[in-house]
Image: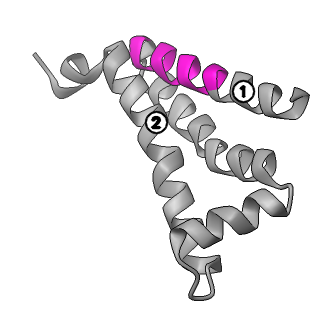
Amino acid sequence: MTLREKTDNIQTGILSGILVPLLTALIIYLFTADGLSISSYLTKISTGNIVTHAITLCVFPNVVIFFFFNRYDMLMACRGVLAVTIAWAIIVFAIKLF
């Protein structure tokens, strides 16, 4: 069994669809924090009314992962990434509505 066959499952897609936005958020925080703690940085994002923009920016790399899995014919992993991306989109819509 090859590595591609071992990792072509929904769990891999879900895990990567959750971890990549979190890593993206961490990288954005490291470049834009200006010495703020994480809690005060999140407060600044919340008071600036840019929560949905921040979430969207962090979730955008999921597109790259989706195309990577699709290119290597790992369709089950694509489903996992797509499911998590749809869940993030529902969260953004819910925040926008309320």
Secondary structure mostly seen in the magenta stretch: helix
Q: Amino acid under label 1? A: Ala
For the residue labelled by badge 1, is the local secondary structure a helix, a strand or a loop?
helix
State the image coordinates of residue 45 (x, y, percent, origin top left): 74, 62
Where does the C terminus fall, quadrant-wise? top right
State the image coordinates of residue 26 (x, y, percent, origin top left): 50, 63
For the residue labelled by badge 2, is the local secondary structure a helix, a strand or a loop?
helix
Q: Residue at x 62, y 72 (%)?
A: 40
Does 45 sit left or right of 18 as displayed? right
Q: In the figure, residue 41 lies in which quadrant?
A: bottom right
Q: How many marks?
A: 2
Q: Is residue 57 above or below residue 80?
A: below
Q: Amino acid under label 2? A: Ile
Where does the N terminus fall, quadrant-wise? top left
State the image coordinates of residue 54 (x, y, percent, origin top left): 72, 53
Query: Outermost residue toward the right?
Result: 97
Q: Residue at x 80, y 33 (%)?
A: 95
Whole-number angstrom distance, CA of label 1 to CA of label 2: 13 Å
Does 47 sit left or right of 67 as displayed? right
Mark 1 nearby-residue class (10 Å; few <14, some 14–19, many ≥20): some
Asked if residue 29 lies in the magenta stretch, the reply is no
Asked if residue 84 lies in the magenta stretch, the reply is yes
Q: Residue at x 76, y 57 (%)?
A: 46
Residue at which label 1 appears: 89
Q: Is residue 31 above or below residue 2?
A: below
Magenta-tinted stretch: 76-87
Residue at which label 2 appears: 18
